[in-house]
Image: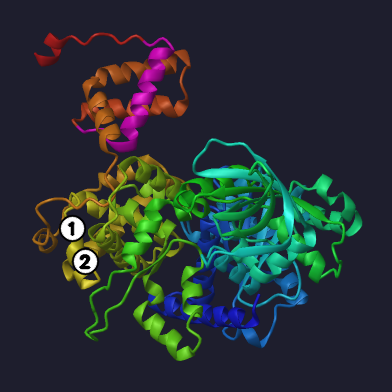
Amino acid sequence: MAEHDLHEYSRALVTDIQALADAEGGSIPNTFTQRVLDILEEAGVVTDAALAYHSSRGLEIYGYGLPEDGSSLDLYTTDFNLTPSSSKLTKAESDRLFRRLSAFLSKHGTIRPNQEDNTDVHDMCVGAEKALSNVPRIRLFLLSNRVSTTSAPEPTEFEGIPVTYELWDLARLHRHETSGSIGEPIKVVFERPLPCLAAHSDEPNYSVVLTVIPGRQLADLYKEHRTRLLELNVRSFLQTRGAVNKGIRDTLLNAPGQFLAYNNGVTATASDVDFETDGAGSPVAIRSMTGLQIVNGGQTTASLHHVLTRDKRDLDGVHVQMKLTIVDPAYLSEIVPKISQFSNTQNKVTLVDFSSNHEFHVAFERVSRSLWAPAADGSGQETRWFYERARGQYTDKSAEYETRAAQRKFKLITPTRQRFSKSDLATFVHSWEQLPYWVSRGAQKNFAYFMERIDKTDPVVDVQYCKRSIATALLFQAADRIARTHSAGSHKRLITTYTVARLSLAAKKRIDLDRIWNEQGATDALSDALDELCPLIMEAVIAGGRHVSEWAKKPDCWDEVSRIPWTLPDALAAELTTEPFEIASPENTESDEAEAAVDDIPSEEWQALADWAREGRVLRAVDRQLADRVAQRLSQGRRVTGAQARQAVEVYEEALRQGFHPVPVDLDRETA
């Protein structure tokens, strides 16, 4: 890692956090914590993370996470320094911060009685108490913008529950954020061609060969190209602390001659390969490769480099098997992510990572970065929005400008507030599309559903599509600022997505997105409406003694919010367009058919189904409750729409399979 790159990243990070904290009126440490948690959530490292700061004698905690699958209880603490280059995070400091964080585990029961219901800290204590009764592990995270001189502590236990420690320092954050950048194709020429075995294939777009590469050569490739060698979809090397990495290192140190037998090798792709051939024209050796990428085996590759440079071993006698797929460049975006996804089993790689080369995101990046946003502050300075198709692109682009003056100009034209990622786009669009319960399920799940919808609808990514998508970002940001003024706290993102969704519903999607783009912000009438609506959303989502994060994930929460009695103010109603604005086509035919099917079944039949299932103890409890709710809604003359309609049809079909016999409705009596 170049020292200069790390220094520039550190300086930019402090500047960004200060600006964001100032804009949002939050504390700098909390803003940094949220920024890092957003990064880690997008990467799939954490899920369902929430801020909740509490400090007392011998204790300090910044937030917690309760993954929906119950896999862990996560606790977070932060070390933020305005001048991070002036000192490093020492082992003594790290141990002290972890010790103060772990104190929450034993003291949360005494903290809870002193907190008001529905506060962030109260929810954290309740969630921790519940989790500690059955959670299989506890993870403690220390987030720092300084370079650490030590690694995380060894695992311990709390009341018999395994406790692991995660240290995310400046170097690790920098490595993570820059590991997805896209560079020039890597070309490798072998002085001694690598013997290979070609597999016969009739596929026109790819071919596969097997070879064995010297470990020293692979280590040198990593030394020269670093994470560029691993940039196609797979996250970079995560140090040698994980069990797999330690095993690789131990074999290299203690049994290098057996490495080929023990190690799974690497899976690689290239866009072009120059072969030596035999008399029949079949490949027998590899002279060179162009566009080399290691899509599985990043840990092996980086471990080889680590042992070569840190442990000072020469790697003589170490060989690594390689499966090399030569892919037609026109099919890279289709084939490479699948090779990577199906072959990678060493470290978790997320859908957000795998989707970077999807044609939708490639097109959105190309079109959106060609747009100039109108000057909105009276300065006459037009700006650009920066879509990060691959993680770290903004940082890399900024680093291309060598002088500070050039970097300042880049950030003037492309400010950090106008940088957004794939998961951000999913959040903005789904809020507009009235899917706040999906947004509330976290970046990974929401993005996965976003991609499902993109694959179904196949939208045309043109200038209009990109402008209107960015307009939903501006709308979301406006609602986010208003939620902050209403003290939404750590629930701000949930409140924001529900506020935008409820506004979209009330306006029937007739908010003028083109005007929002042209003015690069919300009108006064729109801001006033959001300000009026936000407290009503907070009351429905936060109040009631429920666990807010879990409640917000449920379609029932959206059902309750959608029924909040609220009408558009006259000033905003006067600004509405005649026709609704669609971004990514709604649930389209599938939902339309489901809604029609539900409407065709009388409410009495839905109630009979629910009673039958309850008496016979068939179907799941959640399915019986859904049948009850559908019966109630239809009896009140209200429609069942979207995901709930599709779920209802599935429940009805399952009931028929299990023996439910509908009783014909007496139409004469019904119409009497």
Task: Characterize the local packing of mark 2: few (<14), some (14-19) or many (20 or more) Cα atoms within 10 angstroms.
Answer: many
Residue 262 lies, with reference to residue 96, above or below; the image says: above
**Which residue is under mark 1?**
511
The kind of residue tagged 1 is Ile
Q: Is residue 255 above or below residue 70?
A: below
Counting from the top left corner in percent of width and height, residue 74 is at 62, 55
Task: Name the residue rendered at 34%, 9% in the picture.
Answer: 661
* Foreground pick, 326 / 635: 326
Residue drawn 16% across and 56% down?
A: 568
Would you say the magenta stretch is mainly helix, strand or loop?
helix
In what quadrant of the picture does the C terminus appear? top left
- Mark 1 element type: loop
Q: Which residue is mark 2?
A: 516
Residue interval drawn in magenta = 638-660
Please report contact status of discs 2 and 1: CB closer than 8 Å, yes or no: yes
For marks 2 and 1, give the CA distance. Answer: 9 Å
Instruction: Answer with left or right where residue 470 lies relative to residue 657.
Output: left
Q: Say left or right for 412 vs 125.
A: left
Name which of mark 2 and mark 1 comes first in the sequence.
1
Residue at far right of view: 254
Count residues near mark 1 (Cα–Cα under 10 Å), then give few for <14, some for 14-19, many for 20+: many
